[in-house]
Image (spheres, grey):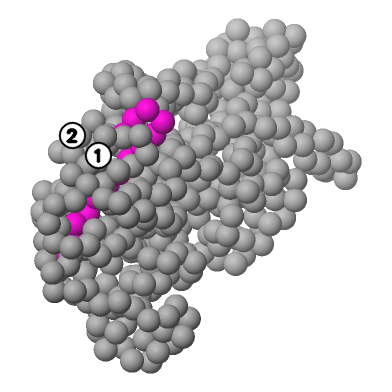
Amino acid sequence: MRHILTFSLCFIVSGCSTIGFDDLFNDYATNTTPIRQAITNNNIESARSLISKNSKNSKTHSNYLLSQLEQGRIADLANNPNNAQIHFENVYQQMQSKRQAAKIQISAGLEQSNALLTNDSAIGYTPPAYEMSMLHSYKALNYVYKHDIESALVEIRRANKVQVDELLNNQSEFDNAAAQAQQHYPNMDNLIRSAKNGFQNAYTFYLSGLLYETAKQGDDAYIDYKKALEIQPNNPYLQHDVLRLAKQQGFADDYNQFKRQFGEVNSLEKNQGEVVILFEQGLIPKQHEFKLRLPIYTSQGDARFYSLAMPIYINNAYESTVNNVKINDHVLSLSSLVHLEALAAKTLEQQVAGRVSRQIFRLVAKEKLRAELARSGGDVGNILANLYNLASEQADTRSWLTLPNQISLARSAVAAGEHTLNVGSQPPINFTVSKQRLTLIYLTSVNNYFNSHVVQL
């Protein structure tokens, strides 16, 4: 009996080869709470220290890519873009390797097998599409701050490709399966709002259009501004930019159509330039665990109800604390480009079917192991198996938790020269606008943390 128990326990532990015991028995969202608190308290040094202490730097660890994302974001918040780029590039290269290396298929199979006796945290974290598009957007911004528009455009094309590829892979059969599983799942409609899927991001398309416009590639800018408008049709700044570029690039039919919808566009005067404000606010919400009770039928057709540990977002939509900014004495309203919480919640919603299926398989596998231990080890084996099952059965709450919640836009023509931007109770930000040029002001606000970047494009 001792040999059987020892073998069984070793088999269970082998399922942790890509995950630490702390990760196995403590969910990711809870472990990351102190880091998020440090950011909201404007203690970035503490956040850096905590993320460094918790970092999973082994490429075989299931949380390696997620750890790299968090470290990259915190490096950006600490105004260390070079370090951020290293972490973001690590994620990109790893994702490329995953797509290209056939041996990963074997590795993925082993991870799925390990997860049957542990939980979904044993599966290597793969950033969903909305996280990958944000990664490339942040890399693009870091190049913009160094006035390297060519490299920024490379990253923004990658961000757009993520969305295009995901759109092609978005199969209706998967949606139908997810819809069936969602009948038993809590509602997240307040967070999801009008998001049709978890990957189309008007912010990345707008940033793309802005960079194409800077590079004097008007047709490409127009295409991406239009894509952004399709996602956020009520954003007045997107309406204006699409109307302006349709006229500028000579798309007469489009211009007449948009003119009927949005009215006339004011041309930029010779002594004017433009200021574009992109404003990040808040932190994306973390996932919580809830127990999903589902009927599972035996081979005799009897229904037995089991509780499955599943992740969920609390259905409370984020409300921004700053809704307008002031340039000199002129008030500009901020208009949302993306609610990342909506993309995150929609992504989770679309993953429900797969997560439920894995949980059911896991339940069956663990029950078989418990029965075998009980048969061979008696009460001791049964108790050990039950204790392990209870401790290891937890929801996989992993996601990139240092992302902002909302990104908004304001854009205005102003006279060339010196200006002052006022944002809530923050100190004034002085900036310069040149004739017929764009000035980008990028703002990040998370409770007590505030940061700004000003760059002439």
Left or right, residue 203 beside residue 385:
left
Cα separation, mark 1 vs mark 2, equals 23 Å
Q: Which residue is mark 1?
A: 428
Residue 448 placement, left or right of 52: right
Residue at left offset 51%, top offset 37%: 285
Q: Which mark is residue 80?
A: 2
- Three-letter code, disc 2: Asn
Q: Residue drawn 62% across and 61% down?
A: 175
Q: Quadrant of residue 199?
A: bottom left
- Is residue 95 something one can see in this rendering? no
Residue 290 in the image: x percent, y percent?
Answer: 67, 32
Q: Which corner quadrant of the image does residue 94 belong to?
A: top left
Residue name at image x 22 percent, y 73 percent? 268
Can you say which quadrant of the picture contains the C terminus? bottom left
Which element type, helix, strand or loop, lies under badge 1? loop
* Magenta span main SS: strand
Magenta range? 437-450
In the rendered image, which quarter contains the N terminus? Answer: top right
Percent x, y for residue 113? 52, 37
Q: Amino acid at mark 1?
A: Pro
